[in-house]
Image: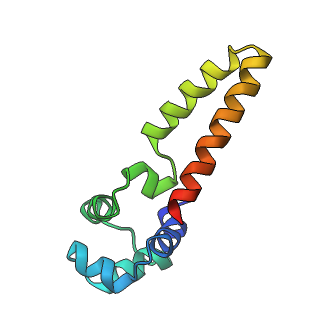
Amino acid sequence: MSIIERLPKILNENELTVPELATAIGVTKNTIYNIINGSSSPKLSTVIAIAEYLNLDISELIDGKNEVMDKYEDKLLELFRDLSLENKIETIGFVSNLHIKQELKKD
């Protein structure tokens, strides 16, 4: 998924409009619209500004990958694979409980 596809989704997730983002990073709304519709490639400075404003890693903005999170996930999978079946089941239960707690905090 490219920035063309990701940016509208990210704006929606952050309840942010194109004009709001443009104003926040100091570009015209047409600049943002042109990125979204693919009529122009964004300047690196614009991509950096968008990522910083949205508190995203640049790679996450561009291609949906968060390199820091990918490293955590890779390490977690590596450790999980070495567990016994019993410990894997216990870990899944523990993580499920953490997920439920996190979802409850959102409400």
Question: Whole-percent x and y of residue 61?
Answer: 43, 57
Residue at horizontal 24%, vertical 81%? 23
How many circles with numbers are drawn on the protein?
0
Residue at horizontal 35%, vertical 67%? 42
Relative height, residue 25 to residue 70 (above, below): below
Whether residue 4 sits left or right of residue 47 in the image: it is right
In terms of depth relative to the viewer, which is nearer, 8 or 91? 91
Question: Whole-percent x and y of residue 58?
Answer: 37, 52
The quarter of the picture where the N terminus appears is bottom right
Residue at horizontal 40%, vertical 83%? 17
In terms of depth relative to the viewer, which is nearer, 52 or 83? 83
Whether residue 47 sits left or right of residue 95 in the image: it is left
Whether residue 52 sits left or right of residue 80 in the image: it is left
Seen as rendered, the residue at the extreme left is 26
Seen as rendered, the residue at the extreme right is 85
Relative height, residue 25 to residue 76 (above, below): below
Residue at horizontal 59%, vertical 42%? 98
Question: Whole-percent x and y of residue 2?
Answer: 52, 61
Relative height, residue 66 to residue 26 (above, below): above
Q: Picture quarter containing residue 96? A: top right
Judging from the image, the colouring scheme is rainbow
In terms of depth relative to the viewer, which is nearer, 46 or 104? 104
The quarter of the picture where the C terminus appears is bottom right
Question: Whole-percent x and y of residue 44?
Answer: 29, 59
